[in-house]
Image (spheres, grey):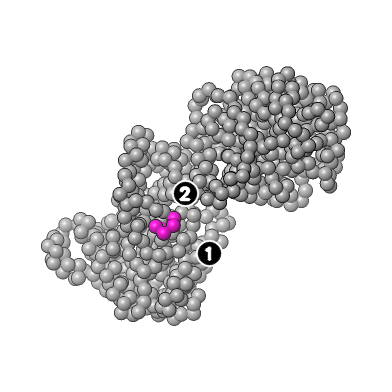
Amino acid sequence: MKYGLVTVAAAIPRVRVADTSYNEQAIEEQIAAAEQRGVDIIVFPELSITGYSCQDLFRSELLLERAEEAIVHLLDFTRKLDIISIVGMPVVVGNTLLNCAVVIQQGSILGIVPKTFLPNYGEFYEKRWFASSLDTRQQQIYIAGSPVTISPSPTVFVTADDVKFAIEICEDLWSPLPPSDNLALAGADIIFNLSASDELIGKHDYLRQLVSQQSARTISAYVYSSCGYGESTQDVVYGGNAIIAENGHVLAEASRFSLEPQLTITQIDIERLRSERRLNTTFSIAQRKANADFIDAKPTAMRDFVLTRQFDPTPFIPKGDDMKRSCEEILNIQTLGLARRLDHTHCKNVVVGISGGLDSTLALLVCVRAFDYLGFDRKGIHGITMPGFGTTNRTHGNAVNLMKSLGVSVSEISIARSVTQHFEDIGHDIATHDVTYENGQARERTQILMDVANKVGGMVVGTGDLSELALGWATYNGDHMSMYGVNASIPKTLIRHLVSYVADNEVDELSRTTLLDIIDTPISPELIPADEQGNISQKTEDLVGPYELHDFFLYNYLRFGYRPSKLFVMAKAAFNGHEPSVSSYDDDTIKHWLRVFFRRFFAQQFKRSCLPDGPKVGSVSLSPRGDWRMPSDASSQLWLEEIEGL
């Protein structure tokens, strides 16, 4: 396990029913291919040694004997291989026959797991041939010449790298009380399922949901392998389903109805799963009564780690068909949050500073939606544009045009004269464009907004976003402060999409034109004078770094607590130039901005410790009242030292 990642495979071999020699060779070929591709654990379908649909042939002594011979050959084949292989076969235990998973590594059987729930309805007749694990007792049997303990107790296997995995077989997953519930609570990170599920109309979609949901309920990875071409088609067809899910998300799956053998391979993030479990206190409570026997796997040789897992470079942004629905839901959360605050305070006036940038635009749009939702007059929204030393004609024009087209109250209050007077009062040279020069403007704007709110009996709606809060890119007691921050949980990379959604679906053509131009405007606080051509000279991403990188770091650090070395490797994979919608960054650039992220994130916690209220929208938030509690004086030394060692 490297960076918390373990490589797993769900195999679908091409089999011949009752031909154990053919099936053994097919399994060996896929084990060899998986070993070459760096797979740590591979699982095969149910009864893959014999084929699932042998029916009454399972009563044949010859078939059972040849199945055991096939295991002998598999043990010899894997003697020098570190890969852990999970194959299905019938196992005789005294006077019973069990449908089992056999776990093999380095020429040894680590353990045998019998099936618990046997389907005996519709096209399934398993109780005709097999007994349940509950019908047996713990005992030692000899298989392939080796003593193996077989038990009805739940079993968790532990690899040399402390990856814990467990097994259930087909119907076990479909039962009301899947064994994987207890196995996950007992510590299993990964559940492997050997299955033989036939194809029916609509069944695949249900199966996919079942695998995904079970991985979510157990906060585990679920690796499902079901038999395919080659099984008997007397009355049923097996299409070959391989599905690998991690905490509710399908990471990889096979193509159904393929004539060829398939290997579905991906990497499971064990660190991510364990982080989620630690965060979920319900999981901790539920595991109190969990129990299982533990079996240790064999030590393995060190080998070069190859990262094959893909990482989403824009984890905050909804994908594909979910975009429209997600944008609507996010906007509704923001809208309802603000509406409730207005209703509770009996307030029908809000004050918003409108700069012509994305953040203030989104805040204004949320105010409009909230007022419409409550049936309030939009004139109660007091939009104020406050041009200063760095305001450009483009942003000023967009701010005024948008307020007018949306029908809110429009005010313009220049801060140039008051800030100039303030600089004279404190003895600051106005030609020195330092932090005093910038923050003096930001605080003047906040003072205006607060005072106007007092005048009209309203509240100031904040415009700052989640990304700015993470980096501390806000003036303390300036734009850092408001009476309700509607964008507090919205990252910078998402705001553009939300504004675009409103432009395309909720406003008139004049407002839409303005919104589209705002989307295309460079992100800037506009606190430094424009260039000679009147264009924005102060671009935020030139100063603090690309927001797509910082949002990537922010999501994965807050959500899962990943260390810098892992974030670095993940970012290299995510921003490698293969995704056309995001930029490409070299290693030095990623490392530089990763250093900036952690340095600023730690140093700026004091600003986050006194944030105004704001609606939580997603799984990542920085509210000090529940989502992120961190000492303001915590040292970043450990994180920065690790970055220097990359």
Residue 614 among magenta residues: no
For residue 78, above or below residue 555: above
- Quick check: can you spot residue 289? yes
Q: Relative to 595, is 201 on the left or the right? A: right
For residue 276, above or below residue 378: above
For residue 265, above or below residue 601: above
Residue 410 sits in quarter: bottom left
Instruction: Identify the magenta region.
Output: 623-627
Residue 106: numbered disc: none
Q: Mark 2 is on which residue type?
A: Arg
Query: Residue 275 or 50: which is nearer the viewer?
Result: 275
Dominant secondary structure, magenta: loop
Label 1 to label 2: alpha-carbon separation:
23 Å
Q: Relative to 6, is 481 on the left or the right? A: left
The residue shown at (55%, 47%) is: 284
**Residue at the spot of label 1:** 328
**Residue at the spot of label 2:** 559
- Quick check: can you spot residue 260? no
Residue 287 sits in quarter: top right
Find residue 559 and report its horizontal and vertical position in percent.
47, 49
Of badges 1 and 2, nearer the viewer stands: 2
Q: Mark 1 is on which residue type?
A: Glu
